[in-house]
Amino acid sequence: MSLLIVAALVLVLFQLWLLPASLLLKHTDYLASSRDNPPPQSQLQQRVTRAGANLQESLPAYLALCLLAMIQGVDLSTVALSWLVLRIVYIPCYLFGVHHMRSLVWVGSLGCLIYMAVKLV
């Protein structure tokens, strides 16, 4: 389970820092500045931002549930891995505008969190 927590944090690093920064490479002056006046965002950059915000909303629950599972000795590694895989799949679904698939993936990841919570009660 601890490996899944580390993997989730790597996902955060990728989705909240590396991916947005890679889309701003043509604005290196902005990246090196105090970032007071951001450059206009493309549609793809806006989607990256929204997908990152969505991850930030569900990540605390995931981390808390993983830690509780470790403390209680409950094996939820398969469901935790499923959540992580669904969150990875969510990124291209959001970025490329695959709306229905994105919604199904999001519901699946939410279902994983609910299942984990129920198993820990």
Image (tube, rainbow, N blue to C red):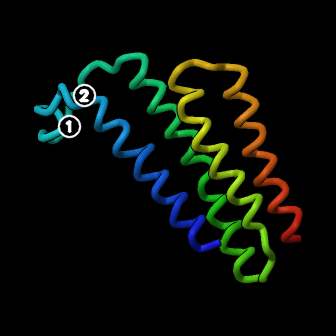
As drawn, is 102 to the left or to the right of 23? right
| Position in image of residue 56 (x %, y %) | 54, 48
Q: Classify mark 1: residues with Cα within 10 Å, few (<14), some (14-19) or many (20+).
A: few
Q: Amino acid at mark 1?
A: Arg
At 57% from the left and 43% from the top, the residue drawn is: 88
Marks 1 and 2 sit apart, C-alpha to C-alpha, by 6 Å
The image shows residue 116, relative to residue 87, as above or below, that is: below
At 78% from the left and 82% from the top, the residue drawn is: 72
The image shows residue 104, relative to residue 1, as above or below, that is: above
Quadrant of the image for the N terminus?
bottom right
Q: Secondary structure at mark 1?
A: loop
* Residue denoted by label 2: 38
Q: Secondary structure at mark 2?
A: loop
* Residue denoted by label 1: 35
The image shows residue 56, relative to residue 81, as above or below, that is: above
| Position in image of residue 60 (x %, y %) | 61, 58
Q: Amino acid at mark 2?
A: Pro
Q: Classify mark 2: residues with Cα within 10 Å, few (<14), some (14-19) or many (20+).
A: few
Which label sits on residue 83? none
| Position in image of residue 79 (x %, y %) | 76, 58
Q: Is mark 1 in CB contact (under 8 Å) with mark 2?
A: yes
Total number of numbered discs in the rendering: 2
At 87% from the left and 67% from the top, the residue drawn is: 119
Q: Which sits in the foreground, 49 or 22?
A: 22
